[in-house]
Image: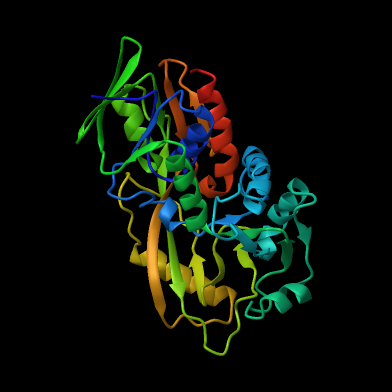
Amino acid sequence: MTAADILIIGGGIAGVSLAARLASRQSGRARTVLLEREEMLAMHTTGRSAAIFSETYGNAQVRLWTREGRDFFLNPPAGFADGPLVSPRPTLFVARPGDTERLNTFLRENPGHAEPMTPAKAHALVPVLREGVFTGFAVEPASTDIDVHRLFDGFRRMALKNGADIRTYREVRGLQRKSGVWTVETNDGGYEAPIVVNAAGAWGGHIGILAGLGDYGLQPLRRTAVMIEPPPELEISSWPLVNHIGDDFYFKPDAGLILASPLDETPSEPCDAQPEEIDVATIAARLEEATTLTVHRIRRRWAGLRSFTPDRTPHFEFDDQAEGFFWLIGQGGYGIQTSPSISQRAADKILARL
């Protein structure tokens, strides 16, 4: 039986960023062990994210946590990464005639972060937008692309440097609390600690059930993305991310290709998500409807599971009914951009119990 002070279940951005925060502040007085069921970290949603830092994305609470992390992205700790974590990528929001009220609500909720844009300026930014399809436009000028690999690897190295123990290929098969300690059974032996953190992403509900606490209403939702070859004569690198305010699609430049998604949210069991042909066909059709592009070749396609709590807000708190069980779940589509803030807040709550 391997003993620890804190056991973290899950090796995605939530679990690894928390391990980094805990290890950097414990100064040798507590041992953190992270258990990941796969043979590599960030294999599922984190490793498949097309992340952007947007201060207008999500509900009011999510936007607050995102804004708290802006300085971390712009000025990470010394030695955290070998290059910048973010690069400029404004977001252009486009609205059809039926989306007017939704666009107006969006602008009212995000003063100082988003502003209206004229059709002429929008079409100048993205010349392939089809004339007459969209009648309303707004821009978030300060949004950025996130280098997910640099961010995740920075947290991973921070955790290891400060003494966290990260163990992969450790599938949790049982949890129980006895005599003030949680015992966690895995395919490779047992672990015990007074505090267990459920940061298992799409498997978070399953871990909650194993602990006898239910699934917290957590629902994994599949989302599809594709990489499309643009016409060779088209210069796309300076385009913003284009996001339909009605949640039909987004697309943006990515390494010389066009990354696009139909913004699908299909309920799924926890799994190694794969794209469905209908969703790939849907984004191709929506792109051709919204732009003058013709989708001749899809270079790559993939899917990931974004897990939401019933109120679509990430949850990080000790369970009221089970001493020492900490929920760190429901990151949804916000886990990358909120990770600096939420990992810090979660670490504060956990360390206060030691």
Q: Residue 276, how many percent across, how many down?
A: 34, 62
Q: Nearer the viewer, residue 228 or 347?
A: 347
Q: How many marks?
A: 0
* In the rendered image, the vertical position of residue 73 relative to residue 187, given as above or below: below
Q: Residue reaching furthest bottom?
A: 233
Q: Residue 299, how many percent across, how many down?
A: 40, 76
* In the rendered image, the vertical position of residue 299 relative to residue 264, given as above or below: below
Q: Do we see residue 29 in this rendering? A: yes
Q: Do we see residue 313 in this rendering? A: no
Q: Nearer the viewer, residue 131 or 269?
A: 269
Q: Residue 39, how many percent across, how many down?
A: 27, 49
Query: Based on the displayed image, in which of its 4 quarters is residue 193 positioned?
Result: top left
Q: Nearer the viewer, residue 269 or 38?
A: 38
Q: Quadrant of the N terminus?
A: top left
* In the rendered image, the vertical position of residue 4 relative to residue 206, given as above or below: above
Image point (57%, 69%), residue name:
252
Q: Residue reaching furthest top?
A: 179
Please state if 53 lies on the left or on the right of 110 as rendered: left
Image point (78%, 61%), residue name:
116
Q: Residue 215, how many percent across, how many down?
A: 38, 30
Query: Based on the displayed image, in which of its 4 quarters is residue 339 positioned?
Result: top right
Image point (58%, 42%), residue name:
340
Image point (39%, 71%), residue name:
300
What scheme was used to colour the molecule?
Answer: rainbow
Please state if 74 lies on the left or on the right of 226 as rendered: right
